[in-house]
Image: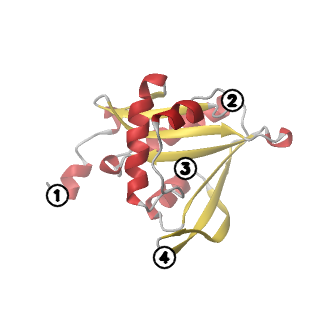
Amino acid sequence: MSDKKESSKYKTNDIKVRFSTKEDIISLKKMFNKVVKEKQFLPTLQEITIEEVTNGWFDLGNYDLIIVAEIQGELVGQIQLERLEDDAAQHVCEIGIIVDPDYRGKGVGSELLKKTIENAKHLGFEKICLSTFHTNRIAIALYKKFGFREAGRRKKQFKIADEYIDEILFERFLT
């Protein structure tokens, strides 16, 4: 099947966006590890375990929320929104987004960002921060589409194999 047909297979209304539950743990682990194996979008190169998902992501003191996207009942993307720990930064949250490689370019990231921005406003945040690799052109375009602007760059922040990767820092004000 050609890429053009593949990318038009699903429509935006096929994407269901919801809050994650503990029943998602196995699917979250599977999707995260699939992205880790690509060795091009995450600063971690180690796969995670069920225990790490359970104790890290679903620890009430850790993330304010996890939003997931489904297509036909299959988990295809996630965003984690985390309140910053510093007292003076309680108006700021950081997000991290992952989209299953098989579902990129189908609107999953856009739907996740829409829901996350809406919830961040509802939770009283005034600013959202995130970062990505300078090589992740699709993510950079998505963030700019949603009003994020580049706030800085950490040169050679990561090294995967023998390649140095800059980390681009993005921010979006909600007020």
CA gap, disc 3 and disc 1: 28 Å
Amino acid type, callout 3: Phe
The picture quadrant where one finds residue 11 is: top left
Numbered disc 1: secondary structure = loop
Q: Is residue 17 above or below residue 111?
A: above
CA gap, disc 4 and disc 3: 32 Å
CA gap, disc 3 and disc 2: 28 Å
Amino acid type, callout 2: Gly
> What residue sits 22% from the left and 57% below the top?
3
Q: Which mark is first along the chain, 4 or 1? A: 1
Numbered disc 4: secondary structure = loop
Pointer 1 residue: 2
Q: Quadrant of the C terminus?
A: top right
Disc number placed over residue 102 in the picture, else none: none
> What residue sits 37% from the left and 46% below the top?
100
Q: Position of residue 62 (x, y in %)?
A: 66, 34
Pointer 3 residue: 146
Q: Nearer the viewer, residue 50 or 137?
A: 50
Q: Which mark is first along the chain, 2 or 3? A: 2
Mark nearer the viewer, 2 or 1:
2
Q: Which mark is first along the chain, 1 or 3? A: 1
Pointer 4 residue: 162
Query: Mark 1: few, some, or many residues within 10 Å (few <14, many ≥20)?
Result: few
Q: Position of residue 149 (x, y in %)?
A: 63, 58
Numbered disc 3: secondary structure = loop
Q: Which mark is first along the chain, 1 or 2? A: 1
Q: Position of residue 93 (x, y in %)?
A: 69, 41
Q: Which mark is first along the chain, 3 or 4? A: 3
